[in-house]
Amino acid sequence: MRFVVVIAISCVASVHCDMDEMALLQSKTNSYLIKEEGDCKSGKCTPGRKRPDVTAAPTTAAPTTADTRGSINAPDFPQGWPFMQQCLHPESSGGLFDFSLPLCESNGATDFPQNARIGIVGGGPAGVSIAKLLHDRGFHNLTIFEKSGYVGGKSKRWVDEKNQAHELGTCYLSGKYECITAWAEQVNLNQAYLDVPRYASSEQSTIRNMTPPNYGLASEYYADFAYRMYQINPEEYAVAAQRAAQAYAEHWVHSMGGVKHIFPMEASLDMTVLNVTFEQWLLERNLQALMPLFFVSMAGQGYGAPSDMPALYGLMWNHPSLVSARAPDGQTHLRGHRMLKEGFQELWSRLVSTTSADVKLNTEVTRISRSQQGVNIHYGNDESEFFDWLIMAAPMPQALSLLSDSTPEEKNLFGGFNYHELTATVFEEKSLGVLPADFELFTWMDRAGEQRDYYRASLLDDGNVTRTMYDKDGDDGALTIRHTSNIKGFENEVFAVLSVSDFRSTNADLTAAIVADTVKYGIETTELHQERWEYMPHYNLEEIIDERKPWRIWDLQGQRRTWWLGSYVSFESVADVLDYNLQLVNARLCTGSG
């Protein structure tokens, strides 16, 4: 029996579904080795905290699984690669496996001590990852409240009758996912590489006929796109893209202000540089040869087209490590693009089991009240627990209604976000039609730019959330098929179709739109399962630049005994969420005195 997972774009939260052509060439590195503000080795640690010497003894907190910290089977980079050393060298100061806390400076203090009782609302990637980071650093009084019956949030999977995991949400590992990879190896998960080129469908292509039932290679479409949109000679496209990839990282550093973390600190930024769309940012630096790749990595992932999305989001997602990653054995392997055989949901389940956290599944939080003495979390049938600290890791703006005492600033920052909707549908595969039997990824390229649906989710005074639709395109059809079974080597075959959908469309409408596309290639299926997601919470350009909302949230961290975590404060990928959490832990927790 063969199954097909059609993900009407739902490689949710870490969606690398369209990154196979991204890594064109290892980038130059010497010019990136800049001195960062806040680099503790230069004596400029975050105010209130200072890192001990890297030779200092760690705390007694230790991982509860086998110690595999010395060997991370992740994509590699050119010698001297400066980005995200906290993941590439996780035992370095402030790294993923540096379990020591900085020493508090004489005029600084930690947000909460190691014996603090910490309530975490939300058991998705943000909630589980912060619990893991805290536990490893000696914070063991942790409670996670999760409304559903599993941890992992959007990292959800569908399991067939042979107990094989087919991703509905978070899909891939690649460059910039080294911290996630380290954790996956620590809990003994297995990886499967993608090693078959992506195929493409396009009615706009001029170099090759890709109109159904015809198709071509994604690389052919990229060259065609560059020619049609930016007048780049197709014969020269590969060289032009390689040169642009070489220059990209240096431009990234100059715009984002540093190499250490993905989320940039405001003090290091020139806001005028970021006051453009991602497409404008690329064109201003003559990097248009990368547009075909970033067009798919953004629009094809449900993150929005580069012409629509603020430069900040495009730069955060398309991190230099994502663009320049290589497979560790030196082979292409779609540049280190791979999946977890057991699925990302299993990653979060195994990680939380290595912590001391009390995980309360199927538990709906009904109200949260904060005071100078602590935090009361009410849940279920009139039950409540008292905590010293609150970590809000649940979706916004919905979760804001749980706070009985939200401030005007909190309401302004978390009361409204733009969203896309993504849908995942699992199909039993009857026939692949004209597609190759071993294909792994197949994309309707034209649709990446056509599916522009987004809506504004806003919290009303009565606690309800309203959704207002914008840029309705009327196209809920298939975007990308991911053949999970060919990638993971499963017996029951599955593939996934990705598309951005209108939340007002019915499930039947979405299925019909997908089937209308797939039958043109002779694909025959039977539907088995469907999921729909609120995806990619984001601000518009004015909210980012003029209102400074992402950095006002950073400034808000620690006030009223609260941390705010999740994709809504960073970016919709588990790599970004974890990196933000690690950055926050290193900035706001310390021990002893200087």
Image (cartoon, grey):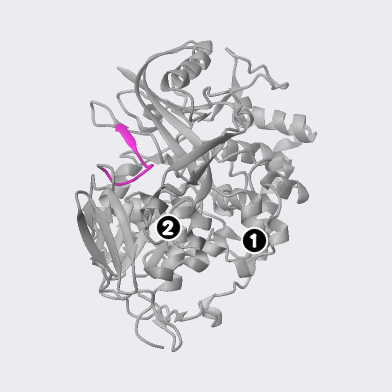
State how many labels appear.
Answer: 2
Q: Amino acid at mark 2?
A: Leu
Q: Which residue is mark 2?
A: 565
Distance of mark 2 from mark 1, alpha carbons? 25 Å
Q: Which residue is mark 1?
A: 253
Mark 2 and mark 1 lie on one chain; the one further toward the N terminus is 1
Pinpoint residue 516: horizontal percent, then vertical percent. Answer: 51, 14
Pinpoint residue 264: horizontal percent, then vertical percent. Answer: 57, 62
Is residue 144 at all visible to an observer of this figure? yes
**Drawn side of residue 368 relative to residue 450, left or right:** left
Pinpoint residue 121: horizontal percent, then vertical percent. Answer: 32, 55
Q: Quadrant of the C terminus?
A: bottom left
**Drawn side of residue 288 relative to residue 516, left or right:** right
Q: Residues within 10 Å of mark 1 (few under 14, many from 20)?
A: many
- The image shows residue 26, relative to residue 95, as above or below, that is above
Q: Secondary structure at mark 1?
A: helix
Task: Name the residue nearer the viewer: 584 or 85.
Answer: 584
The range drawn in magenta is 150-158
**Drawn side of residue 79 relative to residue 355, left or right:** right
